[in-house]
Image (cartoon, rainbow, N blue to C red):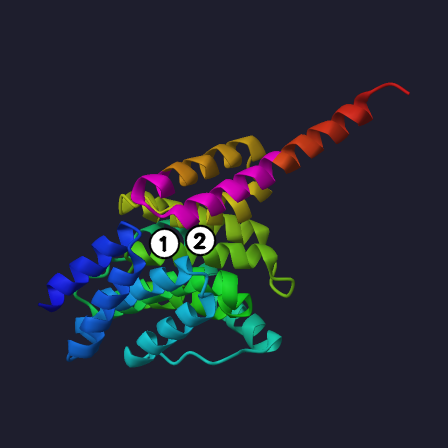
Amino acid sequence: SIRLFCLLANAAYSCGRLDDANDAIQNVLKEGQSIEDKLDVYYVLVTLLMSSKRAEDAYSVCHEVLSQLDENIPASCDAQELAALLRKTNNVLNTMSDSELLGMKNMDSSDRLYSVLRFYSIMVVVAFFSKPQMMPFLTSRIVQISIAHGVCKHSVRGFVQYAAVLCSCKAMKDIPGACRIGRMAMAFAKQFNLSDPHIYYGYFGFVACHTEPLQACADMIRQGFIIGMQVGDISTAFFNAIQHIRLVSIYILLMTKMGTAAQPK
């Protein structure tokens, strides 16, 4: 019965029937006996809340689920704490070679931590819009769990967003290190045959664009838009479109300036 309601919630959400999806979700949350019974519908609930532009509520649901999975997530972190956390995580990553990173064991989907990474991976998306100040904590936690216990497809988004944080954090800005981690993440995406529109704007829009040709990055973000539309993730598809326009605009501006500079006075 719970399984059928989970399937109904997913199907209704995919068809845009949000009220029906919510009814199915509430049935499972009422009847489910354990957190494991409710994980799938909690995930649908988070995506439903994001689609309804209720990012703060979606963040609260992720926080509640991860707390029930024994994760301790602070309400907030100050800048010094976040810088120290990034430094600690970066030190661990820097002691590992590329081959060691790519050779990390795969996490079994039956492992409880697999569900933990699943919800951290969607929580970083929610936090991007609702609590960006928590991104360093959330992404670092994904990286730490993956290194200690193994990687899975849910690790990929965390590694990409961790790299993006390294590109933007003033206290720990590390473009070369971020690009290295980003490349590792994209290699994991290939390993898991993952088509996730989130990783396209995350990597090509905020990491690779610092070192790779802007045209090539814009083309890959366009691919993220196409994938998002194909899998029915319309909001993420259009966020890819926004980042595509941003990179194309930057490219045109740079080319215009270079053309102006090259003209004889």
- Judged left or right of residue 243, residue 263 is right
- Residue situated in front as seen by the camera: 115 or 52: 52
Residue 16 at x, y = what percent? 31, 52
Instruction: Say few, some or many: other residues with alpha carbon within 10 Å of mark 1 (under 14 / 14 to 19 / 20 or more).
Output: many
Residue denoted by label 2: 160
Query: Residue 54 falls in which quadrant of the image?
Result: bottom left
Q: Do we see residue 184 in this rendering? A: no
| Apparent side of residue 119 relative to residue 40 in the rendered image (left or right) | right
Q: Residue furthest left?
A: 1
**Image marks 1 and 2: residues in contact by CB distance under 8 Å:** yes
Looking at the image, is 70 positioned above or below residue 58?
below
Relative to 98, does residue 60 appear above or below in the rendering? Answer: below
Circle on res. 61: none
- Residue at the spot x=36%, y=54% of the render? 156
Q: Amino acid at mark 2?
A: Val
Q: Can residue 160 be seen at all in this image of the molecule?
A: yes
Q: Residues within 10 Å of mark 2 (few under 14, many from 20)?
A: many
Label of residue 156 in the image: 1
Q: Nearer the viewer, residue 34 or 171?
A: 34
* Residue 82 left/right relative to 20: right
Toward which corner of the image does residue 191 lie, by quadrant?
top left
Residue 148 against residue 244 in the figure, above or below? below
Q: Is residue 45 magenta?
A: no
Q: Secondary structure at mark 1?
A: helix
Q: Quadrant of the N terminus?
A: bottom left
Q: Position of residue 206 (x, y in %)?
A: 54, 48
